Amino acid sequence: MARRRILYGLALAGSLLFFIFYRGYLSHLVLFVVLLLPVFSLLAALPSCFLVRVRLELAKTAAGKGEPVPFFLHIQNRSVLPCPAVRFWLECRNLLGAGEKGDAFEKLPFRLAVETGPRSETALRQTLTGNWCGKTELTLKKVRVTDVLGIFSLPVRGSRQQAELNVLPAIQLLAVHLEQDTGMAEDSGKYSPYRPGDDPGEVFQIREFREGDNLRRIHWKLSRRMGQLMVRDFSLPADHGLCFLLEPGADAQPQELDRMLEGFASLSSALAQEGCVHHVGWMEESVLHWEEVEDLEDLGAVLARALALRRFAGRPALSRCMEEGPVRTGSHLLYCTTPGDQDSAFAGLEMLKREKGCRRVTILFAGPEDAFSKAPAFCRVMPLGEGSIDLEELLL
């Protein structure tokens, strides 16, 4: 557009010089035409401000990291005149880690342009790729149309729109080997539908006697009726009292946020596939929000909201957990975090262990290896790096 304005300025200057040095009828006509051209061009472009409609559409709402996702800008020109250029100003922003100090991820502004004919519809196709996990917000900030000469840029009203894409973390395939823990949450009332255990409060199944079975589990009445020995298998509690608390540090870097969510998602997915019920907490609208995860569908719902986790100074999620306590007494708290204000984190976790009934505290962190090297002895510290995670050591 700047080039077009410069060209028009040169044309206007030339016509003025022609008018000054040539006093004939032709110089008047040339100057008059050059002066009127922008007026007619502007009047012809004005209807486009009201008759052009734009719609932003994402092909899907969820994708993996690095997966290109098409998005479309649908342009409808209801005017009888063509529109030489419809220009779009867009911005791509990752909401993960947004906080008081601004966004953790860099905003990416970009521009697009397309020509439309009279009474026509055009679809401009582009792709959006998220290289980090998080809730990616695509914003159509403004739309402007230009006149035929390319001198004027006019706004299209009501054009600001947004679309969101959940870029999901990559989930590691982890093998979980959970054993029944005497310190598990009491009265959870949830039992595994897949495996037997040692809880006599619920019968998992009754089956035929096999060599090596405990004689105390023989169902004598049923054995007499069936004419063979029948054994009770007790149930395995599904709720091991595991509580994930998600809280990025105030100075969390993009790669740390990404690794933190990937580590949590991998752990939670492995537990859900094993039928192990657990809880996940995070700060949302100044409230410590808890959700129960029983299966992968629950995990998907939690991730859809956790992908927009905010960064706060002072670790408010841990502070709120100190006030309210974990979901239930006897829980194993797994604190998923990043470096920043570690002393406050240690003090809060110590209180949860000593006064709020946490049977065990584990810090799962994404960041430099020495970030939590001064953790108290009661805290088990495990980095969320690129390698595998020893779940058996972590959870039992």
Image (cartoon, grey):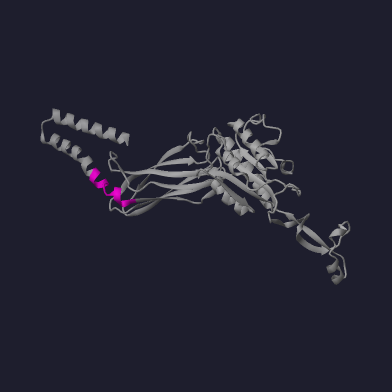
Query: Observer-nearest residue: 86 or 90?
Result: 90
Q: Is residue 229 above or below residue 360?
A: below
Query: Observer-nearest residue: 304 or 163?
Result: 304
Image quadrant where residue 231 sits: bottom right
Q: Is residue 16 above or below residue 120?
A: above
Pinpoint residue 264: horizontal percent, then vertical percent. Answer: 63, 43
Q: Is residue 47 visible?
A: yes
Looking at this rendering, what residue extends furthest in the bottom direction? 225
Q: Magenta segment range?
A: 41-52
Q: Residue at x 29, y 50 (%)?
A: 50
Give the quarter of the figure containing the N terminus.
top left
Q: Is residue 365 inside the magenta stretch? A: no
Give the quarter of the figure containing the C terminus.
top right
Looking at this rendering, what residue extends furthest in the front direction? 355
Task: Determine whether, in the image, residue 388 is placed left or right of residue 157.
Answer: right
Task: Determine whether, in the image, residue 228 is placed left or right of residue 204.
Answer: right
Query: Observer-nearest residue: 153 or 119?
Result: 153
Please identify the dominant SS of the magenta region.
helix
Q: Is residue 247 visible?
A: no
Query: Observer-nearest residue: 255 or 194?
Result: 194
Image quadrant where residue 350 sits: top right
Pinpoint residue 39: horizontal percent, then vertical percent. Answer: 21, 42
Looking at this rendering, what residue extends furthest in the top direction? 21
Pinpoint residue 4: horizontal percent, then vertical percent. Answer: 30, 36
Say how many tags the image has.
0
Q: Is residue 48 inside the magenta stretch? A: yes
Pinpoint residue 345: horizontal percent, then vertical percent. Answer: 61, 34
